[in-house]
Image (cartoon, helix red, strand yellow):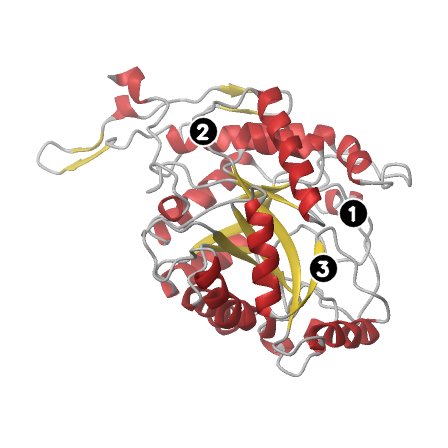
Amino acid sequence: MTELHLAVALDGAGWHPAAWREPNARPRELFTVGYWRELVAEAERGLLDFVTIEDALGMQSARFHLPDDRTDQVRGRLDAVLLASRLAPLTTHLGLVPTTNVTHTEPFHVAMGIATLDYVSHGRAGWRPQVSSRAADAAHFGRRETPLLSPTDLSGPEAIAAALAELHREAGDVVEVARRLWDSWEDDAEIRDAATERFIDRDKLHHINFRGEHFSVRGPAITPRPPQGQPPVTVLAHASVPYELAAADADIVYVTPHSRADVTRILGEVDAARAKTGRPADWPLAVFGELLVVLDDQPGAAAGRLHRLDTLDGEALTSDAEIFTGTPGELADLMVDWKSAGLNGFRLRPAVLPDDLQAICRDLVPQLQSRAGFRTAYEATTLRGMLGLARPISRFADASQ
């Protein structure tokens, strides 16, 4: 099993707002299958564990909590779950982890979408639930309002997390519902015996009867239990409240350290969240570090690339994640150092697509293979298998036995 896990976050033309203006960018193809097919093919050639696909319920914005009127940056995107389902037959090993909003969408529909993706991909689906705090997003649905964040709310990660605490609690309920629905069909519930005229064993389908503060779901699912049993759940977290969401409900948490010392601090906070939520010791929680990367083979050239991109955009790039500029070898050194502090893997955000994705897959990966024991071939056929996660038994199996 690989000693270091590596994922890439795919978003439009890349994570720099000016990426779509680069010579190798393909802005006219951003909404075509061919564009995304080439990205995931590159990721699979690089032996990555998985890719995540960004999504949201509103247009991209340069502001965290409000829409903007800029027309010089990429706006618009494809639905992440539907896109992942289209890409699944075009890949054979790469995990596909779409982002879905859980504030304004029904838990039942989200759970069935991820279960269907797991079938289409033959067990390579994952999921990243995401809350939506923008009032403008709520206006698309008209079912509820989300309060406009104040300057105090936006003063730092902990303040933002506190302001969004209720949305994170609701997100936790959504994940719990999804997990129960995935278990609501036992593995052998399908009989498919034409001779006895029995397609399913009705005793092995279970109502989940979830009742929470925000919604209730009876179940069972309409989709049989996914091939992985439970597709891995991943959560991006920056502060105590989302750390607790990850500790209670996720298989992977993405964190945003800015130094090795920061890695140690964050891992301590994640451990505290695990203790607070009572997560079982035998349920592993992998911690992936996030980095936004600008890469170049020539020393110092990546910083020049970033400066040129910033000039095109009219302002310096900012990010919740550390922005790395340097060579693939320098990035490999940093990753090995941070891994030794306790991280299980990394999710990299390429500043420009396809340029930085190619640098990751063709230049960084060989560096990691020689330093950190990164795989030289895929060793499993499911995403859980690649992550070293056992396939869980349905929580309802004992009830019928």
Q: Is residue 106 left or right of residue 62?
A: left
Residue 347: in sight, yes or no?
no
> Which quadrant of the view contains residue 394?
top left
Helix, strand or loop for disc 3:
strand
Few, some or many residues within 10 Å of mark 1 (<14, 14–19, 20+): some
Nearest the viewer among 79 and 39 is: 39
* Residue at 59 percent of width and 34 percent of height: 246
The reply, left or right, for residue 307 in relation to residue 184 is: right
Tell me which residue sits at (45%, 29%) in the image. Answer: 283
Q: Position of residue 334 (x, y in %)?
A: 61, 57
Residue 359 versus residue 255 in the image, above or below:
below
Residue, disc 1: 136
- Image coordinates for residue 104, horizontal then vertical, percent: 65, 39
Name the secondary structure under disc 1. helix
Q: Residue at x 35, y 36 (%)?
A: 390
| Contact between labelled residues 3 and 1, with CB atoms less than 8 Å apart | no
Q: Indicate the quadrant containing the C terminus: top left, top right, bottom left or bottom right.
A: top left
Nearer the N terminus, badge 1 or badge 3?
1
At x 50% / y 51%, what residue is drawn?
A: 97
Please report whichever mark, 1 or 2, sits nearer to the chain's N-terminal start: 1
Q: Nearer the viewer, residue 87 or 388?
A: 388
- Residue 400 left/right relative to 2: left
The mark lying in front, picked from 1 and 2, is 2
**Mark 2 or mark 3: whose residue is earlier in sequence:** 2
- Could you tell me the amino acid type at mark 1? Ala
**Amino acid type indicated by mark 3:** Ile
Disc 1 from disc 3: Cα separation = 29 Å
Disc 3: which residue: 323
User: For mark 2, what is the residue?
Assistant: 283
**Above or below for 246 versus 298:** above
Tell me which corner region of the image, top left, top right, bottom left or bottom right, holds residue 77.
Answer: bottom right
